[in-house]
Amino acid sequence: MEAVMRDIVNERDEIVGRATREEVAGGRLICRVAFVMLVNSNGEFLLQQRSAKKNTYPLYWSGAAAGHLASGETYEAGARRELKEELGIEVPLKYVGKFYSEPDREMVGAFLGCYDGPVQVERHEVERIAHFSPQHLAGKPNMRITSFVKRSLPIILPQLSALSLPSGHRSTGHDHG
């Protein structure tokens, strides 16, 4: 089986080469990642707590879905693929921007979507899921959250007011989780 290749980029997200997963990890190269945050009709974020067996950020809270892009894959295609793989859902997504995560050596394309239905969690990847208000996450929550959540909130939170939530509700400030 042929190894999946990833695009290697610089800090300006310009493609400078291709490498395997092992070469990326071993060479501290920068690759691309899609990251998805979902809100429900109450304006609460769905976060997943990463499995204790994960190599990076075990038991940390992260967005609804995230994953590395294959070489040539767009951020949006990667975001849609990861949502389907990790939660078993498809929803319209809004691109909200990208950022370079230096600690992770990853260029991250962030997306926002709305979803109220059931999810099918990958049990080997995820400990549990819960909803949190924007106010809770924007404050200094007493929880371990990934660098992606921390770095994406400044570009995602301003987008919430422009987002058409399914039932027209806004966050009540109640936390679930």
Image: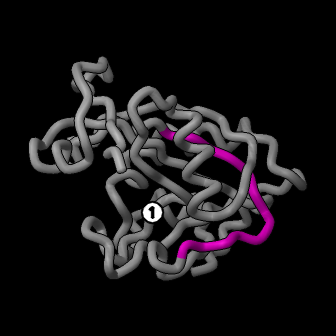
Above or below, comparing residue 58 to residue 149 in the picture: below
Residue drawn 10% across the image and 42% down it: 27
User: Which residue is found at the position 57% from the left and 34% from the top?
Assistant: 76
Q: Residue at 32% of width from left, 30% of height from top?
A: 7
Left or right: 163 in relation to 133: right
Which residue is at the front of the view, 111 or 32?
A: 32
Q: Residue furthest left?
A: 27
Q: Which residue is rendered at x = 23% and y = 23% of the image?
A: 17
**Count of number-bearing discs:** 1
Outermost residue, front direction? Answer: 1
Q: Which x, y percent locates residue 99?
A: 36, 34
Determine the main secondary structure of the stretch shown in magenta.
loop
- The residue closer to the viewer here, 47 or 92, is 92
Give percent across and percent down for residue 152.
Answer: 44, 45
Relative to 12, does residue 4 appear above or below in the rendering?
A: below
Asked if the magenta segment contains residue 116, the reply would be: yes
Residue in front for this viewpoint, 60 or 125? 125
Magenta region, residue range = 110-122
Question: Percent x, y for residue 132?
Answer: 59, 69
Which residue is disc 1 drawn over?
Answer: 62
Closest to the observer: 175 or 37?
A: 37
Picture quarter containing residue 80?
top right
